[in-house]
Image (cartoon, rainbow, N blue to C red):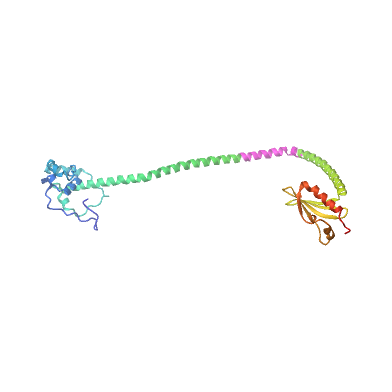
Amino acid sequence: MLFSQGTKGYDAPAQYDPSHEPLSQKRIDEIPLEEDDRLFMDGYVNVQRPNHASQQSLATKRPLIPTTTTTDIAKRQRTAAQQQQPSSSLRRMPDYLPEEMNKGYGDMPRSTALNDMYRRINELEKIKQDYDCLVALRFTEPERIYKAYVAAESKQLEAADNYVKGVEEELARITRENQELKEKLQHSKANRELVNQVDELNQELTTISAQNETLKKAEKESKQAMEMYQNLSGLSITGVRSIMEGDLYTCVQTGKRGTIHFKLLCEKPGNDVRYIPLLDKKKDAQLLSLLPGYLTTEIVFQKDKVHVFYSKLRNVLDNLNTTA
């Protein structure tokens, strides 16, 4: 790099060493290592870089740098005139130039050196533009693919939505037509259906009447049977109702020497029967004194033992010692 950014746009150019001899009078092997590198990077010496150890051995094989002639200078000037001038986007050259640029390189004129520098700047600018294009392509290509995918999917979804909308509209139309046909059919069959319904209701009424007569007869027979059972056993069931725990029966048992009121609860679910005596301490004081203890409190037994319980209850009421 010949120039660097400074406070006034560019730093002062590197100091030229006047002790350097003209390049045309030097052999390559006589050029110091650092100056050889500079010339190699500038493109004026096209030789392979020997390592430091073999530099002296190759010194005798290096050619002399040819002297620039007047013909070469004219040819370079014509070539420089034909080259493309730098674009306006390039950085403006400073008002001052380093001593090397004013003098050129060796016998190379100042215009040729400037053109060569412009050429290099253009090449660097082109390389930077290519790099920027590659970076933009790298980061925008996935986005382009994603946008294309989203656009394609959006079109497919829109087409699917339109298809579904069309199907729904067709379904609604068919439903309306079907409802209209049903209404017409109902109106046309209304009278016949009404007649059929009347006939069916009459048949049901006849059946219900017959069932009602049967139920009344069965209820009468059941009532007669219950009365006969009460007369024979002395047990009267005065109430039946269903509660959360099961079926509750209110009973009265009359014996030869006393009467007791109690309830029987048939628990559901389960197979237990609970005996609940209904005794008043004042009203049934005499009965309480005569009854055994297990009949004065709640007891539980299995359903298949109900007949045993009833037999003991009846036996107690028939054999109470009321004369004591």
Residue that protrudes farthest toward the front in the picture: 324
Q: Is residue 233 visible?
A: yes
The residue lying toward the viewer, choosing from 266 and 51, is: 266
Q: For the stretch drawn in magenta, what is the main secondary structure?
A: helix
Can residue 205 be found in the magenta stretch? no
Q: Quadrant of the C terminus?
A: bottom right
Across the whole image, how many numbered discs are drawn on residues?
Answer: 0
Question: Where on the picture, by quarter, is residue 210?
Answer: top right
Q: Is residue 187 left or right of residue 70?
A: right
Expressed as whole percent of the image width and height from the top left, the position of residue 284 reads 83, 59
Residues drawn in magenta:
174-194
Q: Is residue 85 visible?
A: no
Residue that protrudes farthest toward the left in the picture: 25
Q: Residue at x 14, y 50 (%)?
A: 103
The residue lying toward the viewer, choosing from 16 and 246, is: 246
Can residue 179 be found in the magenta stretch? yes
Q: Residue at x 44, y 42 (%)?
A: 149
Expressed as whole percent of the image width and height from the top left, the position of residue 182 reads 67, 39
Expressed as whole percent of the image width and height from the top left, the position of residue 260 reads 83, 55
Q: Residue at x 21, y 48 (%)?
A: 117
Decide: is 71 above or below 252: above
Expressed as whole percent of the image width and height from the top left, the position of residue 13 reads 19, 54
Question: Where on the picture, by quarter, is residue 63?
Answer: top left
Q: Is residue 62 left or right of residue 180?
A: left
